[in-house]
Amino acid sequence: MNKTIPLDSPNISRTLFKLALPAVVANVCNLLYSLVDKIFIGMLPNGINAMAGIGVTLPLALLVSSFSLLVGMGGASLQAIALGKRDYEEAENILANGFILLLIIAAVLSATLFLFKDQLLYILGASEATIGYASDYLGMYLLGTPFILIVLGMSPYVNAQGFTKVSMVAVMIGAISNIVFDVIFIFGLGMGVRGAGLATVFAQFLAMLWIMRFLFRDEAIVKIKISTLRLKKDASYKILALGVSPLIIQSTEFLVMATYNRQLLQLGGDVYIALFAVMHTLMMLVGLPIMGISKGAAPLISFNYGAKNYDRVRAVIKLYFVIVVGYLFVYNLLLMLFPQPAVSIFQRSPEILQIAPGAIRIYFFVLILSGVQMVCQQTFIAMKKPKQAIFLGLLRRVVLVMPLIYLLPVILPESIVNPPNAALMAVPIADIITTIVAAFLFAKLYRKELLQESDPTVSRCD
């Protein structure tokens, strides 16, 4: 369980597989939180309104998890670079500061969101028919904010040390216990959507105990020590400066989801909010496994970039790209061919199944291009180039998607596409443009920094 994976192992494909597989399994298990909740909620009386209520809470849940990236992705990349330089003292300082930052952020975030939750839910698209479901679920979910942030925020530090199985087991504990608690709270105690939220809290608490048990013990290469638990300005600044990129990328996704909820409510009503909640889950089905692959690739890129072993960095990036694009091609093809069966897993309402095929084929039309963007963005972050990643995130979501959500239903005739589907076209149009820009920026970085010889003092790949 606690055997580390050497990041300088000569066999790159095997090392990436060993790093990524547990992270992929962990993310797939993490997906069970959302899948099981939505399947059970879809079984409740008045399932469309219940599903729409949960859909309204999704942007806030995404916002909560995005703050784990601020500390987790930024700090883990710095820790991996420090380990590549054999600077263990710096790695310990980064880890300790990351833990303290997560505790502070969790306290502030949960209190703020709980205080204004109903007001925020109305802004995000709740209606009189769905506000009760949304408020009940979110009220319970926010109780687990500290547990959620620690699990999601500390896991990248564990992965960056090569202990990917530890993170995998933590998520498996949470996913399995979440199913058990869902059955108990939703159906056994008749708590409905409140039970789904409470089940997530208990499940994340158990997962947090597993992660912290490891990080405070001697098995870890870099562990949390009482003597290092001090907030240091320099280390905190480095973590936040690098982590602000994934925070902006995911928090702008929060804005996109909020904009979609409000616009779809106006254009198509609660049935489109419910469908969009299902579509978000289908996006998670593809996104979370890819994030697992990214968690395997990122420490490999950062470690070898810190060690100036550029031939290995190039090899990791190429392999990373092939895996992500190949997976997305298969997934995209299945969604285009079988949209209704995919939706019927979560909702079998005739109203939703009738509108699902057109909406899904529009929204996921060029899904494969999102993989190209992700490889570019994650590589920029792993190589301490956050500005490029931030630019791409803002370009896609703020500059392109959000204005197009409002513009396309106005300029496209209803004889060609109905208004809700016109709004959904914003994503594929933005993906085409952003991918072109991402490819240009990545090619420029690749030529400038990676087309050079590795440091002869470090081991080269076979």
Image (spheres, rainbow, N blue to C red):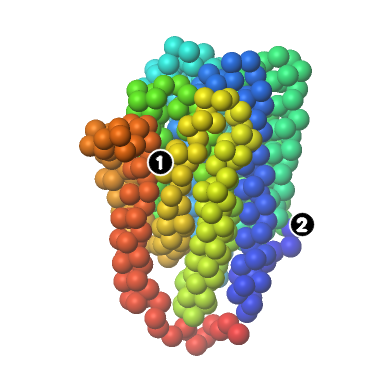
Rendered position, 392 above or below 177: below
Splitting the image into 4 quarters, where does residue 210 fall? top right
Is 152 or 229 nearer to us in this picture? 152
Instruction: Identify the residue position indicated by label 2 in the image.
Output: 1
Ranked by sequence position, the earlier of labels 1 and 2 is 2
Q: Is residue 295 visible?
A: no
Judge the density around disc 1: few (<14), some (14-19), many (≥20) Cα neighbours within 10 Å.
many
Rendered residue at 47%/72% (across/down): 305
Rendered residue at 74%/38% (across/down): 176
Q: Is residue 274 left or right of residue 220?
A: left
Kind of residue sitting beneath label 1:
Glu
Q: Secondary structure at mark 2?
A: loop
Q: Position of residue 40 (x, y in %)?
A: 67, 26
Judge the density around disc 2: few (<14), some (14-19), many (≥20) Cα neighbours within 10 Å.
few
Q: In 3D space, how far apart are the residues under numbered discs 1 and 2 (Cα atoms)?
A: 35 Å
Residue placed furthest toward the bottom: 456
Q: Position of residue 28 (x, y in %)?
A: 64, 47
Q: Position of residue 252 (x, y in %)?
A: 37, 41
Numbered badge on residue 283: none
Rendered position, 376 above or below 31: below
Numbered badge on residue 253: 1
Q: Is residue 327 left or right of residue 195?
A: left
Is 201 or 358 nearer to us in this picture? 358
Rendered residue at 58%/82% (across/down): 461
Residue placed furthest toward the front: 415
In which quadrant of the rendered image does the N terminus lie? bottom right
